[in-house]
Amino acid sequence: MTFKINIIACLLLLASTSVVAQVKTVMPGKDFSSVKVSTGLFVEIVTNSEENKIEVKGSERDEVSIEIEQDELQLSLPVGQIFSETEILVTVYAKKVEELKSRAGSEVEFISPVRQENLNLIASEGSYIGGELQVDYLTVRSVTGASISLIGSANTSNIEVKTGASFDGKELKTEITEVSLNFGGEALVYATETCNASVNAGGTIMIYGNPDTLSQKVKLGGEITVIE
């Protein structure tokens, strides 16, 4: 997958005459299992790291707020910095990430495969989450124009898409998937055993994998399509 984050990383590398001088490294000193990214930041996440570490690249790297509250790493920019033309890239090295929240136009990508039991992903307000997974149980919530794109595998997945958001999981192979779509948007899922799909008030669900058991419900418009 090619993402905007990769382009930004290349631009930062080319534009910097001294890469070391452009990098701010933060050792949080606390463990965390949840990450929340806000206000238009571009973030890469490396999971299963030996230590928790955050690297910030860009001339305005000192503007990035890095806090840990109640087991959650929170990354954000000041409101006045959102529309700055300066590109900032944050790389998070984490021992584990069980929950990721991306909001307010932020773009977050797992740049190493996520291999663990459970993962919860939430994207809202035009933000983006992408990456490769190998998990047992996956929960996804994509709302208000956000998008989530995943590849890999999950034994069981629960997908919720609302208000013009999207989920692309046609290359995320699951055994059991429950997917609901409300008030517009699109969801692409892959299930081999069971898929329960429902659409309410517009939107499209596309089902791949030819599941053995399929339940379909459409209310007040929308469509469900099975791709053979």
Image: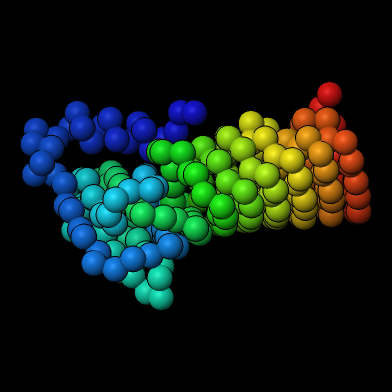
Residue 7, image x, y percentages: 35, 31
Residue 17 vs residue 105: left or right? left
- Image coordinates of residue 120 in percent, x first then y, are 57, 57
Q: Residue at x 48, y 44 (%)?
A: 114
Question: On screen, 97 above or below 134?
Answer: below
Along the viewing direction, whichever of 158 and 102 lies nearer the viewer: 158
In this view, the residue in front, 109 or 201, is 109
Q: Quadrant of the C terminus?
A: top right
Q: Is residue 20 left or right of residue 58?
A: left
Question: Where on the picture, by quarter, is residue 111?
Answer: top left
Any part of residue 10 in sight: yes
Residue at x-position 88% and y-position 36% = 212
Image point (70%, 39%), residue name: 174
Residue 66 quadrant: bottom left
Residue 140 can be seen in this image? no
Q: Is residue 104 left or right of residue 85?
A: right
